[in-house]
Image (cartoon, rainbow, N blue to C red):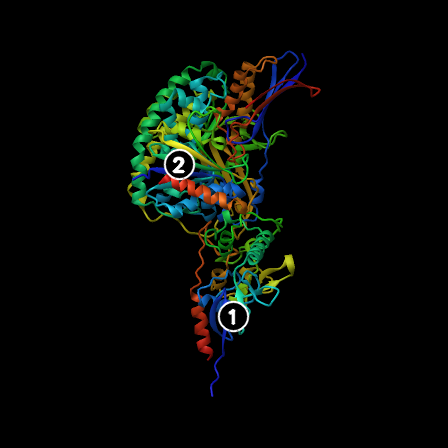
Amino acid sequence: MITGPRIKTLTIDDKPVGAREDETILTIARENGIRIPTLCHLEGLTPIGGCRLCLVEVKGIARPVAACVTSVQEGMEVTTDSPRLTQYRRMVLELLFSERNHVCSVCVSNGGCDLQDLAQEFGLTHLTVPYQYPRHKVDASHPWFTLDHNRCILCTRCVRVCDEIEGAHTWDLFGRGMQARVITDLNQPWGSSQTCTGCGKCVHVCPTGALSEKGKSVREMRKSREFLPYLRLMRQGRQV
Amino acid sequence: MSRSTITIDPVTRIEGHAKITIQIDENGHVEDARFHVTQLRGFEKFCEGRPFLEMPSLTARTCGICPVSHLIAAAKACDGILAVTIPRPASMLRQVLNLAQLVQSHALSFFYLSLPDFLLGMDEDPKVRNLFGILAKFPDVARDGVRLRQFGQSVIEELAGKRIHPSWVVPGGVNEPLTESRRDAILSRIPEALAIVRRALERGKRVLEDHREEIRTFANFPSLFMGLVDDRGLLEHTDGKLRIVDAHGKIIGENLDSTRYREFIAEANEGDSFLKSPYYRPLGYPAGIYRVGPLARMNIVDGCGTPLADQEWAEFRDLERGAVLSSFHYHYARLIEILYGVERMEQLLLQRDILSKHVRAQANVNNAEGIGIAEAPRGTLIHHYRVNEDGLVEWANLIIATGHNNLAMNRGILQAARHFISGRTLTEGALNRVEAVIRAFDPCLSCSTHASDQMPLHVSVVNQAGEILDQKIRG
Amino acid sequence: MTPPVLLIAYGNPLRGDDGLAAAIASEVSRTLPEETVEILTTVQLLPEHAPSVADRRLVIFVDARAGEKPGTVNLSPVSYPDEAGGGAALTHHFRPAHLLGLASLFGRVPRALLLTVGASEFGYGGPVSASLRSALAAAAGIVAGLSR
């Protein structure tokens, strides 16, 4: 006898929906045309619930939960939008902007940046928390790509795509708190990396201008991510 | 009578923040006059560590009035780092953009900022001495001013988009070719612009002639002149090589290699101003005083290279035997340059390959150093970068047009102050003339959008003990 | 065809309530067809706006005002010269009356009205104050009514 995943019923923003028990709130919301803002999440990569932008309220649970990593449960009542959630999301964005030197006006990804899009969506024009102005160097040692820590939000999309899809695991996280940053190999210049295949997937999944192609001027970097779900499917197909 | 100091702060109807101090000696004679720029912006410092491809956009932020000039000088410096010769269509498109910027900036300087002085009189009440005074008495002139500036801005928009800081000019060329419809849209507006500038020149020449006293005393002294010329020695704002002439109009530096500008330009820092004071190195400081900008350009070239402007240029150069020395003639030179700009734009836009798709050369970092020189409306603009082997900026030096003129402006203020100010009599007209000397150079001081118009002008006469003996507040 | 009515909403949307004019403009654009009213949103008035002001049936300037009681909507006629005179105005202090003055150079001077809404929060960032919502709707209604 084959037992498939069980079906759960729940409501999202008062809309009754049905979901497989192994699905997340985010997946089922998207399937039903309900938009939940996300930043670290990317279809095709393992969700980590890192950025906290997809926080939603679940009736009976005091604290909001991250929709990208919370599985559905029978009878759940989910709210995706409320003044409290908006305030939390704004604060998340403000903290991201304050932590590094995000200067959109001179950025390669200006006009094509997930962080900037969200800031515009939430009407974030100024910060209520002080800027930290950390000193971060730019790693332009790779022949084709540039890494600018000033624009990195530590979403780890690059780490995940390199590990899960390309299989190289060139990227990783280094340091804690304010000192945390992405590194290549054992904190070596990207250009000297032995493991990097130069495939550029990390550049295209990067939500901001932190990773970009060399030769691109301001506003010229546009990321294309259509390859990701396709590659994912192909890999899963092979594993079966 | 004791020694005293007159301070004019801020200087109105210029772009930026500056003040003037005039030192009066015991006998009431003007002893010294100084022009201070009171802001430090530190652009050169925060460019360090950035990828060089960002430099055009970064440095364009020095100014919301003439970002195009910085874009072009920066892109040229970056072309040098890429070690490319940009495609001819790209070079022509940059030229058209630069000329459009020149036209709109000169139109602002002449019609909005300077004409009120000329048409309504330097002694007129400042409440009336402005664009609206012109509107009341010379409506056709006001209309021409608005239209001409609009023309220049519309050309910039057609080429580079509506943003104040366009990102169309890139290292290696421009990032989009010109379309036929946009080219035609610009061409269709040229006849009106040409008619306006010809009218302005006719009127301008008549009006300027009436200002003999100002011509004689507005920074009228021998100096060197510097600017770019093309390979035939004609007027050129975007490409070309530097030429320096002396007060007799004799060429003393020709085909100066831009990569070696430091051999002939040195910079002095003076304690009381954030504006650096460059001078011609072979003659030393301060004898190496030189001027840049419209007047300088008219003095260094062998001609303009467009039919109408060439006629006007010949007439202009007849004013004096050698170089034209009075800075009051910056205004006149500016008008000829607008004429040239409109004519030259048309010439360029009619070139067969102006619509070519080949507008960008791609390359990696091939040179550790790049120097870009362009003529901004106000004069020669130099961008000089050094990058590491990954293309990150290690050092940057920007010499802005207004900087070149610093020494000349100081000397000019002193000359006008001596002539128009005596003792403690601070007449409105005298003060305005001292300011007008600065305005003749059309300085873009902080390279910021802060037009200080309508700010109160605060002038005080202070003795050595710091007591205010007299003061005048207007605005 | 040039729309008979021009709405000029000015103010800096990055300065709190100063973005009120832009908000009113976007509300108006939702309710009225673009053949009826052309909308110009700008941070500040400029001499170069004058040609597009000329030859309209009506020009409505919309501005948020610090000096007036928050929420009060005021409608007043604009003419040139106004009681403040020509003024030494350029760029940062360019007023509706100035624009009308210059418009005379480019055609018939239109009937012009200035709609102001009193506001208090002009700090950096932040949306238009929630307390101004009803004033915003009222102002948009007035503009729409005038434009028809």
What residue sits right under mark 2 in the picture? B153
The tally of labels here is 2
Looking at the picture, tell me which residue is in the foreground, C10 or B356. C10
Name the element at disc 2.
helix
Q: Is residue B217 left or right of residue B308?
A: right
Quadrant for residue B3, please give it: top right
Residue B240 position within the rendered picture, expressed as x and y whole percent measured from the top left:
41, 36
Q: Indicate the amino acid at tag 2.
A: Gln
User: Which chain does the numbered disc 1 sit on?
Assistant: A
**Above or below, comparing residue B277 to residue A96 in the picture:** above
At 69% across and 21% down in the image, what residue appears? B466
Q: Is residue A174 above or below residue B212?
A: below
* CB-based contact (under 8 Å), mark 2 and mark 1: no
Front-most of residues A217 and C143: C143
Q: Is the residue marked by circle 1 packed among few (<14), some (14-19), or many (20+) residues within 10 Å?
A: some
Q: Nearer the viewer, mark 2 or mark 1?
A: 1
Are discs 2 and 1 both within one chain?
no
| Horizontal side, residue B197 vs residue A50: left or right | left
Residue that badge 1 annotates: A24
In the image, B258 versus B125, the foreground residue is B125
Q: CA distance from mark 2 to mark 1?
A: 53 Å
**Label 2 lies in what chain?**
B
Residue B326, above or below A50:
above
Depth check, front residue: B43 or C121: C121
Q: Position of residue B453 (x, y in %)?
A: 51, 28
